[in-house]
Image (cartoon, helix red, strand yellow):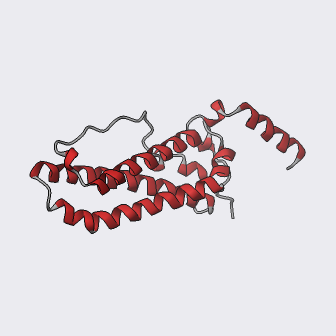
Amino acid sequence: MTDKTQASPNTRGYDAKRAMDFARSEVFERTFKEGMALVEEAAAYLDGPGRAASKRLSRAAALAYAGESMRLTTRLMQVASWLLVQRAVRDGEIPLGEAAGEKYRLISREPQAAPNFAGAEELPEALKVLIIKGAAIYERVRRLDETMYEGGGETANPVSNQLARLNEAFGR
């Protein structure tokens, strides 16, 4: 049986050790829990109180509600998918090189403000809070994805590189 966490030829361009260390870290565990909790919170709101609130909105606000809830759901599903892939890497269920492929990556781009829908100012406060939280976790995960899989070997912290060499030299 092969170790699925080992670097493969596809891992060129990023620091495989750093990516694996992150997937095994407490920071990842907290991010995973926070992301999944937000998915559950948003689903509960949109399926319950949010649905009732949306029925009381003006036509323009109801359209804004539909657009923003779809945008929120899409972002959170992308976050959940990315987090689940990293957990699968950590658990040896998929190779790290596969997780680094386009198929599993968050779209890496500079954050851009989403255009407001007409009527967005009338949205329920609870949805506005979820939108803000969703944008924040998405941006955090997008930056993690970028840090882990885009040229990490070229832009890695020099101190980390030296520590890694020392650990390698002394077998720690």
Furthest toward the right, the residue is 170
Q: Where's the N terminus, which quadrant?
A: bottom right
Q: Is residue 168 left or right of residue 157?
A: right
125 to 14, vertically: above or below: below
Q: Is residue 170 left or right of residue 32?
A: right
Identity of the residue drawn at 55% across and 37% down: 150
Most distant residue in the left direction: 59
In the depicted view, which residue is nearer to us: 45 or 67? 45
Residue 130, horizontal then vertical, whole percent: 36, 54
Residue at position x 15%, y 54% in the image: 62
Instruction: Give left or right: position of 168 versus 103.
Output: right
92 and 18: which one is in front? 18
Q: Is residue 74 visible?
A: no
Q: Which quarter of the picture shows residue 47?
A: bottom left
For residue 107, which quarter of the picture?
A: top left
Examine the rendered structure and indicate whether residue 7 appears above or below residue 84.
above
Q: Position of residue 38 (x, y in %)?
A: 42, 59
For this rendering, which residue is in front, 111 or 169?
111
Is 131 positioned to the left or the right of 68 in the image? right
Viewer-side residue, 131 vs 86: 131
Which residue does the image show at 29% across and 53% down from the upper left? Answer: 125
Q: Which residue occupies 26% across, 50% down? A: 68
Q: Position of residue 75 (x, y in %)?
A: 37, 50
* Residue 159 to residue 22: above or below: above
Q: Is residue 145 visible?
A: yes
Residue 124 sits above or below residue 154 on the image: below
Image coordinates for residue 14, horizontal then vertical, percent: 62, 39
